[in-house]
Amino acid sequence: MAAKIIDGKGIAGDIREEVRVAAQELAERHVVPGLATVLVGDDPASATYVRSKQRACEKAGIQSRDIRLEASIEESELLSTVSELNADPEIDGILVQLPLPSHMDPQRVILTIDPAKDVDGFHPVNLGKLLSGEETFYPCTPHGIIVLLERAGVTVEGRHVVIVGRSNIVGKPLAALLMQKRAGANATVTVCHSRTANLAEHTRRADILVAAAGQRAFVTEDMVGEGAVVVDVGINRVEDPEAKKGYRLVGDVDYEPAAAKASMITPVPGGVGPMTIAMLLQNTVHSARNRANG
Ligand code: GUN
């Protein structure tokens, strides 16, 4: 059986159009949504992600402010920049691209962001609200995965979702969102990680298998149950002399053999990645709407 490919790019495109319409309505009320992106250092992958986010903002009618800081600056300088953005009435969302240089503490930086402008959903106040089932800014990748499944016609209610990876950005918040007692959630969740014994035994039992391990080909064919829905969150660069840029992107799933067993699968690129950006835009417009409604 060949798996149906879940079109993340197309679904994200629909959401971006919805966001554009919402942003236009706000602009007519003289509230132009604004997102500040902060990039510290010049990591090429991070620079590419930030550029994609800014371009998506432009197309959606969200003003983006591009802040770039040298990798060598003191952490205190970054904290001051964030505080200024907190106080800036034109900025609805603040995104500090991670990872940060090793001499900085990402948690301290995240704590400095005003939770009302935390469109990444990384602030402990927002993560706490998420865990207790309150509406708030949800982290973009896990929220994007849930919306992607929903719009692709995959029900999570009552089904067994196995997540491989326990990061603060994906695994942990995704588990918390999926287990909530509400429509569109109500899943049974297993979280596996690098110390899980007999990993394949767990993953093979998944109705929906989410690969968020951060390692190429981590999820192999023997780990996928017949007919499972496979969601690949990985973005790994592999050298490819034939590619224009000298590399291509692959996920965390050994794609071809896994796709032969799965009923549905998300591709890389064009799966979860575009959804992350769509959710960021949605959060930013949501924040601007909060500003407009005082
Ligand atoms: N680095 C990798 N993913 C993300 C993300 O969603 N937000 C931020 N700020 N940094 C990231």
Image (cartoon, helix red, strand yellow):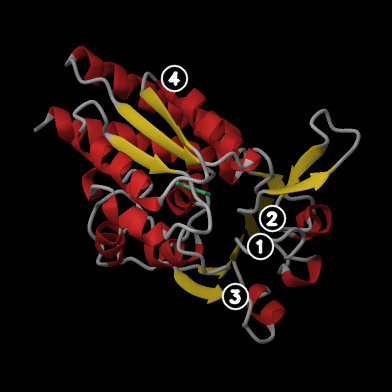
Q: What element carries label 2?
A: loop
Q: Are marks 3 and 1 in contact (CB under 8 Å)?
A: no
Three-letter residue code for mark 4? Glu
**In the rendered image, is residue 186 in sight?**
no
Q: Which mark is residue 57?
A: none
Q: What is the spatial separation of the Cα atoms under label 4 and label 3, in whole angstroms?
A: 37 Å
> Which residue position is annotated with label 1?
228
Three-letter residue code for mark 2? Ser
Q: Are marks 1 and 2 in contact (CB under 8 Å)?
A: yes
Q: What is the spatial separation of the Cα atoms under label 4 and label 2, in whole angstroms?
A: 36 Å
Taking depth in this image into account, of 55 and 267 the one nearest to the observer is 55
Three-letter residue code for mark 1? Ala
Q: Residues within 10 Å of mark 3 (few under 14, many from 20)?
A: some
> Which residue position is annotated with label 2?
263
Q: What element carries label 4?
A: helix
Q: Which mark is residue 193?
A: 3
Mark 3 vs mark 1: give the one in front: 3
Q: Where is residue 7 in the image (x, y as percent from the top left)?
A: 62, 38
Q: How crowded is mark 4: few (under 14 residues within 10 Å), some or many (20 or more)?
A: few
> Which residue position is annotated with label 4?
58
